[in-house]
């Protein structure tokens, strides 16, 4: 873009209790980075990493006279506080592009964040620049350039998604057989269908069906089998005291512990 901005890098969520926020997002099923501490400030964060962007949970670890924006925000509420844009090139390039548009970006400012990892301490570094409030009305925002992206975009921290699978299955089965909706990819293999989803999307599609939290990924979590008579199947399962759930769409779901570790969906055809 001619303004030097490539898109959104991350969104900052201001929180009053950082550890409580971490536990809450963990219960929602998200993987978080280790806690980072901003050098020269009394703020710290946890990040939820996606393929192209991320969410930052930002809070105080001690009273900080410098983080006025966060302190002012938290007086009123918690929640999404700021948007960090990603520069198309360096922060200096973005500043030059914005200046050419008649805007007034600040000089780039260095920021370091200390991370304690099992192999030792690392310091991801960033270059930040801001615009005057009147040039971004109604939005608390800034530009954030990553100087050491390899330190914060580790595979084990990324939220899993299915988009990266599509090119391979386009080649294998043909693009006309591969479709995607949000984060769920569907591949038609003759009369059969393969569905790829994240654990979160699996839970959304099949409420009440729990996956083992230690289920190894990637893996086949469930199979759907056709049955001729749903009621007769339900009667049979009840007779043999096999646990099952009735799904909203009419399918019968047999939990993984009853079927050697694989959820079975039985659907009348």
Image (cartoon, rainbow, N blue to C red):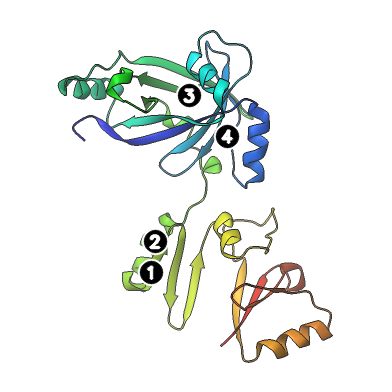
**Above-or-below relation of 54 to 213:** above
Q: Any mark on residue 124, and which?
A: 3
Which quadrant of the figure contains the N terminus?
top left
Q: Any mark on residue 166, and which?
A: 2
Q: Is residue 198 left or right of residue 254?
A: left
Q: Nearer the viewer, mark 1 or mark 3?
A: 1
Q: Are marks 2 and 1 in contact (CB under 8 Å)?
A: yes
Residue identifier under label 4: 33
Question: Label 2: few (<14), some or many (≥20) within 10 Å?
Answer: some
Q: Quadrant of residue 165?
A: bottom left
Query: Residue at 74% of width from left, 74% of height from top?
Result: 244
**Above-or-below relation of 54 to 191:** above
Q: Are marks 3 and 2 in contact (CB under 8 Å)?
A: no
Q: Is residue 246 left or right of residue 241?
A: left
Q: Where's residue 111, x and y in %?
A: 44, 17
Disc 3 secondary structure class: loop
Mark found first going from the N terminus, 1 or 4: 4
Q: Where's residue 211, x and y in %?
A: 67, 60
């Amino acid at each position: 873009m001619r303004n030097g901005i490539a898109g959104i890098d991350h969104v900052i969520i201001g929180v009053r209790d950082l550890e409580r926020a971490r536990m809450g997002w963990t219960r929602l099923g998200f993987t978080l980075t280790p806690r980072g501490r901003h050098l020269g400030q009394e703020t710290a964060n946890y990040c939820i990493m996606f393929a192209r962007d991320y969410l930052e949970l930002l809070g105080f670890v001690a009273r900080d006279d410098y983080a006025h924006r966060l302190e002012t925000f938290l007086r009123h509420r918690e929640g999404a506080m700021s948007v960090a844009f990603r520069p198309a090139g360096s922060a200096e390039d973005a500043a030059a592009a914005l200046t050419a548009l008649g805007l007034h970006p600040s000089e780039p400012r260095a920021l370091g964040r200390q991370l304690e990892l099992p192999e030792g301490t690392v310091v991801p570094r960033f270059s930040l620049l801001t615009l005057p409030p009147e040039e971004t009305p109604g939005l608390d925002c800034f530009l954030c350039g990553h100087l050491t992206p390899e330190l914060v975009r580790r595979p084990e921290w990324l939220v899993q998604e299915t988009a990266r699978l599509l090119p391979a299955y386009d080649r294998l089965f043909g693009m006309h057989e591969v479709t995607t909706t949000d984060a769920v990819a569907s591949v038609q293999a003759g009369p059969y269908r393969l569905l790829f989803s994240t654990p979160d999307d699996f839970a959304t599609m099949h409420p009440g069906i729990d996956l083992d939290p230690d289920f190894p990924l990637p893996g086949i979590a469930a199979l759907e089998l056709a049955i001729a008579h749903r009621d007769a199947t339900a009667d049979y399962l009840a007779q043999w005291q096999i646990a099952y759930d009735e799904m909203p769409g009419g399918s019968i779901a047999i939990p993984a512990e009853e079927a050697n570790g694989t959820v079975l969906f039985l659907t009348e055809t």
